[in-house]
Image (cartoon, rainbow, N blue to C red):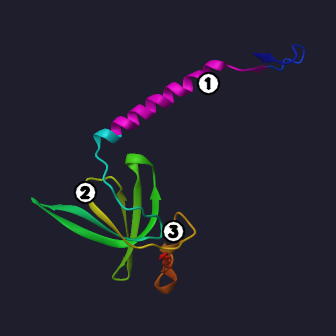
Amino acid sequence: MRIGNKRQKKFVIIDISLYLRKPKIKVKMDAIAFVHEQMSGKKEFPKFKAGDNVTVNYKITEGNKDRIQAFKGDVIKRQGRGATQTFTVRKISDGIGVERLFPLFSPSIDSIVVNKVGRVRRAKLFYLRERSGKSARIKEKKQIHHA
């Protein structure tokens, strides 16, 4: 389809074949994602977001022994989608801030326990890195139980 004046040499060319190819790629990517999800067994974890206080129990291999170690802290961010999703947990250990990034569907994560649900207005809480003491606290979200 061409629109324009030949004298001014302004034309708009619309190639319909570009629009016809996109659904094929979408279907192919959905099929790949579906097979990937079927092959990697997804674990069920509780819903949590940035600002929540969680305990991540993860497996550590020392020599030929396996043990489970807990990492308790505040979730700073969640990022990614699907099998590549990660989250960062920050805690204060002996007055030093320690952050650890966990892949959500990692086989080394045993369980995730939500201790407190925080009330924050941001998805990424990087401002906590500069803060210490009382200003680094996150308010707890009040749970209203209807009787």
Q: Which residue is mark 3?
A: 125
Q: Secondary structure at mark 1?
A: helix
- At mark 2, the secondary structure is loop
Q: Which residue is mark 2?
A: 108
* Relative side of 15 to 106, left or right: right
Q: Is residue 30 magenta?
A: yes
Does the magenta segment cover residue 94? no
- The amino acid at mark 3 is Leu
- In front here: 22 or 45? 45
The reply to whether dot 1 and dot 2 touch (C-beta < 8 Å) is: no
Answer with the quarter of the image where residue 6 lies. top right
Image quadrant occupied by the N terminus? top right
Q: Please state the extent of the stretch shown in magenta in the rendering.
A: 12-36
Q: Is residue 87 left or right of residue 120?
A: left
Q: Nearer the viewer, residue 111 or 133?
A: 111
Picture quadrant of residue 65 = bottom left
Q: Main secondary structure of the magenta part?
A: helix
Q: Nearer the viewer, residue 118 or 131?
A: 118
Residue 82 location, x and y as percent?
41, 47
Q: Which residue is mark 1?
A: 19
Where in the figure is residue 61, as x and y percent of width and height? 17, 60
Residue type (three-letter) at the residue carrying disc 1: Tyr
Vertical position of residue 110 compared to residue 72: above or below: above
Q: Are marks 3 and 2 in contact (CB under 8 Å)?
A: no
Cβ atoms under marks 3 and 1 closer than 8 Å: no
Residue furthest out toward the right: 7
